[in-house]
Image: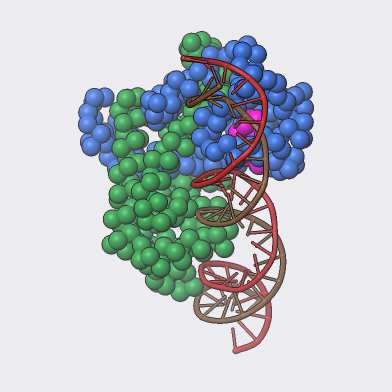
Chain colours: A blue, B green, C red, D brown
Amino acid sequence: MTDVSRSSASPGASPLFLREDEIRRGVELLYFGYTRLTNSIDQELAKQGLGRAHHRALYFIARQPDLTVGELLKLLAITKQSLGRVLKELQDRDFIETLPGQVDRRQKLLRLTATGKELEAELFRQLRGKLSSAYVSAGQESVSGFWHVLEGLVPESDQKMVFDLRKDKI
Amino acid sequence: MTDVSRSSASPGASPLFLREDEIRRGVELLYFGYTRLTNSIDQELAKQGLGRAHHRALYFIARQPDLTVGELLKLLAITKQSLGRVLKELQDRDFIETLPGQVDRRQKLLRLTATGKELEAELFRQLRGKLSSAYVSAGQESVSGFWHVLEGLVPESDQKMVFDLRKDKI
DNA sequence: CAAGATACGTCAACATGACTGACGTATCTC
DNA sequence: GAGATACGTCAGTCATGTTGACGTATCTTG
């Protein structure tokens, strides 16, 4: 079996010394892990007539209430036309509501309605089920390794934006 | 700051004890990590007039030469109509070639042409650049944690298929 | 050996979620 | 008051997935 310790590369070694198989293993696990995690909520979304694009918006609005449209655009890295359609549908179905910015009235602040919170919570329960069982079976040591590697995949230009999600506004 | 060691959950503890924030951190890092890794090859693919669907097929054929269409369908988890279009385009552009199965002549074995190998290698170089720098900055200990967590996300029914990719036929 | 299962291909219609480009309005900043 | 910014929107297109139906070659089995 593939054994990490077999690689004698020191932490500071050149990336060129990493064996191809270790990279392919990462690519594949990332692909399967990501797709299987996202697949796990498709059925629930379909019940509501929503797609994954709606969930991504819902998720980030839940995570950072009173997020502006511009901030959400940066997180999702899609065009405003694409996001516009998604937000309109979420609003029409009463999952989100908006209010003008307090400090800058051009901005539109996004938040979940009670219905939206319920839906997001249900979807989150399913993600938590999958991910927490992976965390538990791997152990806490592995979880922090998992985080460290993924943090290294986020380009520096995006890191502030991503890490700021954790500084909750509460 | 979020600190892993703050959670006192033992490895066998119930998932219910995992804090919400730890799960959200995983969801977000997986989302950003995966999308940023895949984004990194879009430009190269666009040069060839190909999309990500083509890359996924190319990748798995490179990984397991003489893969059958049926095996590729299981890996990609899409319909044969969708895959058919992608394979046809790859063949028209001379990136892949096929030959009938030796043991079962109904099967079509897929492999890369020389051109296809070059393209896949170039795309892989870019993935390796991103992922190996993440591996190096996180350290080998973290890398195996990264693998363990992701392995836990792959449903049992898919694990054999996924892990068998590493047993090269060669 | 005939019957049915399997591997693959293909036609047609459609859904989702992205994209580009152009243009409009309200609001903020200088 | 002029220009930049935040957001919205119309119109057309593309990539990639879907369902359903049907065809053909080949393998397996009673």
Q: How many marks?
A: 0
Q: Residue at x 32, y 63 (%)?
A: B113
Where residue A110 appears, as percent x and y from the top left, is 66, 24
Does A110 appear in magenta? no
Q: Quadrant of the C terminus of chain B?
A: bottom left
Q: Residue at x 52, y 60 (%)?
A: B83
**Against B66, is B120 above or below?**
above
Q: Residue at x 44, y 64 (%)?
A: B89
Q: Quadrant of residue A19?
A: top left
Q: Quadrant of residue A18?
A: top left
Q: Nearer the viewer, residue A67 or A132?
A: A67
**Against A165, is A89 above or below?**
below
Q: Nearer the viewer, residue B159 or D20?
A: D20
Where residue A149 appears, as percent x and y from the top left, is 39, 28
Q: Specify whether A64 is left or right of A50.
A: left
Q: Specify whether B164 is left or right of B13.
A: left
Does A58 appear in magenta? yes
Q: Residue at x 43, y 36 (%)?
A: B36
Q: Nearer the viewer, residue A120 or A110?
A: A110
Q: What secondary structure is the stretch in magenta mostly built from?
A: helix
Q: Nearer the viewer, residue A3 or A65?
A: A65
Where residue A79 appears, as percent x and y from the top left, is 54, 38
Q: Specify whether A20 is left or right of A170.
A: left
Is residue A16 visible from the viewing direction of this image?
Answer: yes
**What residue span does the magenta drawing correspond to?**
A51-59
Where residue B43 appears, as percent x and y from the top left, is 38, 46
**Against B34, is A166 above or below?**
above
Is residue B152 visible from the viewing direction of this image?
Answer: no
